[in-house]
Structures are given as structure tokens and as C-alpha cells.
Image (tube, grey):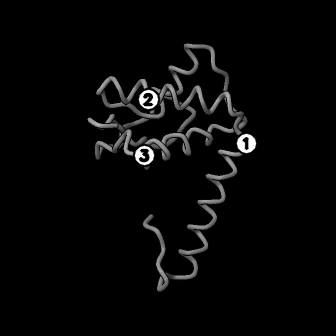
Amino acid sequence: MSQPTLWSDPDEVAAHQERLAGIAAADDGAPDTWKRSARHIVDVWADTGEPFTADHVWETLDAIGVGMPPTPSALGPIIATAARNGDIRKTGRMVPTRHRHRHRDLTEWTGTPCG
């Protein structure tokens, strides 16, 4: 969804505001130590130059013994911040999740050359 403008449909503006509120709530609910660990793992994946998804980040966090945050949505703001900072970019591909309890395709990311 693109950012609404002054002439946007009021429903679109409300949906955008709800989305931003949800992202902020997910970020606020995650412990700072978890957020630092997750951001480090996103950076590690970015540095490999290999494409990755949120599944890769979750699996790596699990492998190093970092527990789950209060909500899995907490990873969204971490990845969004890395993208906004220019550290990662979308590859343009959506790939199926490797986890059966998730029911959607995931954005594929890669590190940026100067990120």
C-alpha cells in the first residue's frame, strides 16, 4: 500500500494509520535485547549477499538460542528499518514460507552494496 496523500480516500488513510499503529505496537512490545539480536541477524544475512526472507532470520535466531518476542510481528519493524536505512532491498520476488503455520508468501531481501 502506498502512503496516502491529502486527496486519498478516508478509508485508505485510516487503514494506513492502523498499519502504522500496529507496526509501532509490535516494535514497542519487543524487548530491546531481542531487537538488537534480530537486527544483528538481519545485518549478517545482508552481508552474505545471498537472498533471504524472514524465515531465514527466524531460523538463525532460533539456532543461536534467541527466544521469540511477545509477537512474531516484531520482526517487521526490524526489517523495515533496515530497508529504510538502505541496508537491504527487496529482490522483487515473493517466496513461499517454509513454515507450515504461516499461510502467505514472504518478501525476499538482499543486502545492498553500500549498506
**Mark 1 residue element:** helix
Amino acid marked by disc 3 = Asn
Measuring from the top left, give residue 14's x and y in whole percent. Answer: 61, 73
Give the residue at mark 3: 85
- Distance from the alpha carbon under mark 2 to that under mark 3: 12 Å
Q: Which mark is residue 29?
A: 1
Residue depicted at x 67% and y 28%: 33
For residue 79, side relative to residue 110 (left or right): right
Residue depicted at x 65% and y 52%: 24
Residue 13: quarter of image: bottom right
**Mark 3 residue element:** loop
Which callout, 2 or 3, points at the residue further toward the start of the chain? 2
Viewer-side residue, 16 vs 35: 35
User: Quadrant where the C terminus lies?
Assistant: top left
For residue 110, side relative to residue 4 (left or right): left
Give the residue at mark 2: 43
Amino acid marked by disc 1 = Gly
Can you tell which of label 1 and label 2 is closer to the viewer? 2
User: Quadrant where the N terminus lies?
Assistant: bottom left
Q: Residues within 10 Å of mark 2 (few under 14, many from 20)?
A: some
- Is residue 65 depicted above or below 105 in this figure? above
Viewer-side residue, 23 vs 88: 88
Question: Which residue, as the protein is rendered here, is positioned at the far left?
Answer: 113
Which callout, 1 or 2, points at the residue further toward the start of the chain? 1
Question: Which residue, as the protein is rendered here, is positioned at the far top?
Answer: 64
